[in-house]
Amino acid sequence: MKKLALLASLLAIFTTAVFAKSTLTLYTSQPTEDAQSTVSAFEKAHPDIEVKWIRDGTAKLIARLQAELAAGGAAPDVLLIADSVSMEALKQQDLLAPYKSSLAVNYDPQLFDKEGYYYGTKLITTGIAYHSKAPVKPTSWKDLLRPELKNMTTLPSPLYSGAAQIHQATLMENPDLGWAYYEKLKDNGAMPQSGNGGVMSAILSGNKAYGVLVDYMAIREKAKGAPIEFVFPSEGVSIVTEPVAMMKGAKNPEGAKAFIDFVLSDAGQKLVLEQGYLPANTNLPVPKGFPPRDSIRLMPVDSAKALAETEANKKRFADLFGNR
């Protein structure tokens, strides 16, 4: 009996050792439903890894991360947050670890850091949304400057919205738009909202006929029967890429690398498509409600330059429109 008990004990120890899961800590700004489906799909592909995840807005996650590091606490293993400018800031603070994923060959070089510090996983574009009964069907950013549209346009404020910050920085790179465009928007009565949600509400309520808005919000609402349309302007659209990165000093670096590879893989990109976003991998189709991929023109942005100019751009916006 003692021998049987000993064998059972050894077998239990062996089984635990063989089938024990490693833990991966993820901080993400994905909407909760998307984050859960991403984690579930990853764990299904990697049953030996258990993901513990925390979801919040990008700014709040970074503030939490900074506070934890200052207090000597443990950092997450991997980040999946909204934009490349936030990732660039973390890179410059020496908080990220480079990883050269072999899957980067499937992506446009502008979507990832050339040293492998972060990789864009999807394309969330900012274009023009408008009420289905609006008098003009815009096709260009400059259509919002038409005198007959005076006081009919709203836009998210870069003082509150990360996507709006990226959009602002992107327009600064375009010599036909830039600050002169924002000044003309102001002269034509454009009114900022705090974020994209406020813009969409203003359009749906009929309070404003036009708005600068991220693509999926308008396209999803239209699919539900809401009176809203979305257009990708002829000059191009700005993009938020929801990049993924491994933290420097990650406790589970192999798990972090596996997570990065997963979200860049065909399976990970098909999940992006199922969630209703434009996959970063151009070999995949577009979600329902989107135009053909080759008709969507992406405007370039320099993340390092955008980071360096963020505070100056925000101040200039506040001076122009007020602290909205």
Image: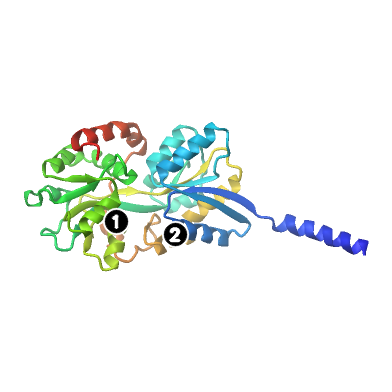
- Between 153 and 236, the residue placed more toward the observer is 153
Quick check: 188 above or below 234? Answer: above
Residue 254 horizontal side relative to residue 219, left or right: right
Q: Which residue is mark 2?
A: 33
Q: Position of residue 102 (x, y in %)?
A: 51, 50
**Location of residue 316 by image quarter:** top left
Q: Position of residue 231 (x, y in %)?
A: 22, 57
Residue 232 visible in the displayed image: no
Near mark 2 (Cα within 10 A), the count class, few <14, some 14-19 or many ≥20, is few
The amino acid on which the numbered mark 2 sits, given as a three-letter code, is Glu
Q: Earlier in the sequence, mark 1 or mark 2?
A: 2
Q: Which residue is mark 1?
A: 215
Quick check: 287 above or below 57? Answer: below
**Location of residue 43 by image quarter:** bottom right
Q: Position of residue 221 (x, y in %)?
A: 29, 63
- Between 257 and 219, the residue placed more toward the observer is 219
Residue for point 52% across, 57% down: 39
Residue for point 17% across, 63% down: 132
- Between 193 and 178, the residue placed more toward the observer is 193
Quadrant of the snapshot with the N terminus: bottom right
The mark closer to the camera, 1 or 2, is: 2
The amino acid on which the numbered mark 1 sits, given as a three-letter code, is Asp
Assign a secondary structure to mark 1: helix
Q: CA distance from mark 1 to mark 2?
A: 18 Å
Residue 198 visible in the displayed image: yes
Quadrant of the snapshot with the C terminus: top left
Quick check: 277 above or below 79? Answer: below
